[in-house]
Image (cartoon, helix red, strand yellow):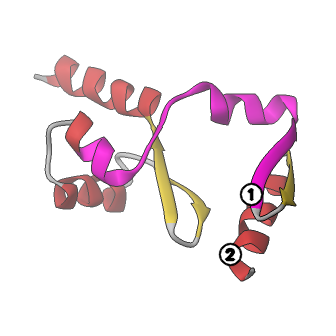
Amino acid sequence: MKNSTYLSKSLQSKGIDFENVDNSAQIIQKSPESKELYSDSLLRPRAASRYLSMSESGLYQLLKKGVLVSYKLSPKVTVLKKSELDEYVQRCMKTA
């Protein structure tokens, strides 16, 4: 129950109304500000590292250095925006 409350508050802070019906989470309304978050594909760190063709530890080093940004949706769910990963690849290609 604690995790669903955290998730609910996390989504509400992003302008998303959240409702838990029969233990299945449902988003019932999105504010205009939340469209940016959901217009992108979101990738978990393992999928993001595969997308970038690098190790997970390499990805975490980039996150630690601030080169990439991750978003915490709940205590156990971290995601990265695919569009930001694409921008990172473009920056790397320009410097090479």
Q: Is residue 3 above or below residue 84?
A: below
Label of residue 24 in the image: 1
- Tell me the element at label 2: helix
Q: Is residue 53 left or right of residue 38?
A: left
Q: Quadrant of residue 52?
A: top left
Q: Please name the residue shown 25% across and 35% down the image.
A: 51
> At 75% from the left edge and 80% from the top edge, which residue is drawn?
1
Magenta includes 42?
yes
Q: Nearer the viewer, residue 2 or 69?
A: 2
At x 45%, y 26%, the residue is: 83
Q: Secondary structure at mark 1?
A: strand
Q: Nearer the viewer, residue 61 or 45?
A: 45
- Residue in view at x 45 percent, y 48 percent: 69
Where does residue 45 sit, x and y in percent of width and height? 35, 52
| Magenta stretch, residue numbers | 24-49
Q: Residue furthest left?
A: 96
Q: How many marks?
A: 2
**Residue that numbered label 2 is attached to:** 3
Q: Nearer the viewer, mark 2 or mark 1?
A: 1
Say which of 44 and 85 sits in front.
44
Position in image of residue 17 (x %, y %): 89, 48
Position of 30 with respect to 75 (left or right) is: right
Residue type, mark 2 in image: Asn
In x, y percent, where is residue 86? 35, 25
**Among numbered discs 2 and 1, the one appearing first in the sequence:** 2
Distance from the alpha carbon under mark 2 to that under mark 1: 13 Å
Amino acid under label 1? Answer: Ser
- Residue 25 in sight here: yes
